[in-house]
Image (spheres, rainbow, N blue to C red):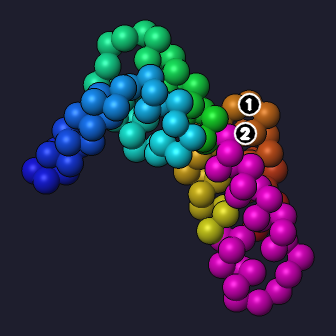
């Protein structure tokens, strides 16, 4: 119940600020973009939110690819945990990745074991 209220309050705040202005804000979260997508029927807003969501997903994928490669040749528990965390995050983001990103993710997933 509180999650529904939280979402409603967040959506009200986003609408008050302006949905397009909110979407163009560099620090908007993926959760806010998803909330906007679920609650709008305006094609322009949907397109902007989708593009921004794809951009954020691509940034996260690139960051995790870089992190994995940074710790690839290092030994120790911290390096192992960093690689594992990167692999798990890449698995979660695979579905929304671009075709080029999917190839890079699959390369890491097949070589991680």
- Direction bottom: furthest residue: 76
x%, y% of residue 18?
36, 26
Task: Locate residue 102 relative to residue 4 in the image: left or right.
Answer: right
Q: Using the rendered view, name the quadrant where residue 101 is placed.
A: top right
Residue bearing the label numbered 2? 102
Q: Main secondary structure of the magenta part?
A: helix
x%, y% of residue 86?
67, 63
x%, y% of residue 94?
62, 43
Q: What is the distance, in whole Å, between disc 1 and disc 2 at their CAs? A: 5 Å
Residue 95 seen in this snapshot? no
Are the residues flagged by discs 1 and 2 in contact, CB closer than 8 Å?
Answer: yes
Q: Looking at the picture, does residue 34 appear above or below residue 72?
A: above
Q: Residue at x 84, y 64 (%)?
A: 69
Q: Pointer 2: residues within 10 angstroms few (<14), some, or many (20+)?
A: some
Q: Looking at the picture, does residue 72 appear above or below residue 102?
A: below
| SS at badge 2 | helix
Q: Which residues are magenta?
A: 58-84
- Direction right: furthest residue: 73
């Amino acid at each position: 119940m509180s999650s529904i209220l939280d979402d409603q309050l967040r959506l009200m705040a986003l609408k008050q600020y302006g949905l397009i202005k909110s979407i163009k804000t560099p620090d908007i979260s993926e959760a806010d973009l998803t909330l906007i997508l679920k609650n709008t029927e305006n094609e322009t807003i949907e397109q902007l939110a989708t593009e921004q969501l794809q951009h954020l997903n691509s940034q996260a994928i690139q960051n995790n690819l870089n992190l994995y490669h940074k710790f690839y040749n290092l030994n120790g528990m911290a390096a192992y945990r960093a690689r594992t965390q990167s692999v798990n995050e890449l698995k979660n983001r695979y579905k929304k990745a671009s075709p080029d990103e999917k190839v890079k993710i699959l390369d890491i997933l097949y070589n991680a074991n």
